[in-house]
Image: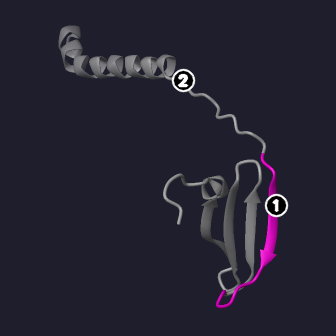
Amino acid sequence: MNKKTNFKKNSPLVIINLILILSLYLIHYTSSAKAQVLQRSNVTGITGSANGANGELLYLINTTNGEMTSLSFDINAKNLKVIGYRNLIQDGQFQQGNNR
């Protein structure tokens, strides 16, 4: 085999490799990732029980963001299940309008 035939045979591979190298270069130098800054939160936990609940309940209140999440501990599965979420700030806002 001569060199000219070898080059023609391998030219699609060379082109594909050049395209892959160029795409990796573009992805590496054009993409950017930024860390998300989270504010520190104050969380209060309150335990309780409810009729019909299969285990103990846990209410987590985030006083910084005004959020409450209720969780149930399933004794059989030994895991926490989310019961509900409420935004306490939105719940406490007064609705303007016809209040009868």
Front position among marks 1 and 2: 1
Left or right of 98, for residue 45: right
- Classify 10 Å Cα crowding around label 1: few (below 14), some (14-19), many (20 and above): few
Residue 22: image location, x then y, percent: 39, 16
Q: Residue furthest bottom?
A: 52
The quadrant of the rendering that contains the N terminus is top left
Give the residues in magenta: 41-53
Queried whether the magenta region covers residue 45, the answer comes back as yes
Look at label 2 and name its amino acid: Ser
Residue 21: image location, x then y, percent: 40, 19
| Residue 37 drawn above or below residue 55 | above
Left or right of 36, for residue 60: right
- Classify 10 Å Cα crowding around label 2: few (below 14), some (14-19), many (20 and above): few
> What residue does disc 1 label?
44
Residue at the image position 49 percent from the left and 58 percent from the top: 98
Queried whether the magenta region covers residue 13, the answer comes back as no
Could you give the CA–CA distance between mark 1 and mark 2, rounded to whole angstroms?
A: 36 Å
The mark nearer the N terminus, 1 or 2, is 2
Tell me the number on the disc at residue 32: 2
Label 2 near label 1: C-beta < 8 Å? no
Look at label 1 and name its amino acid: Thr
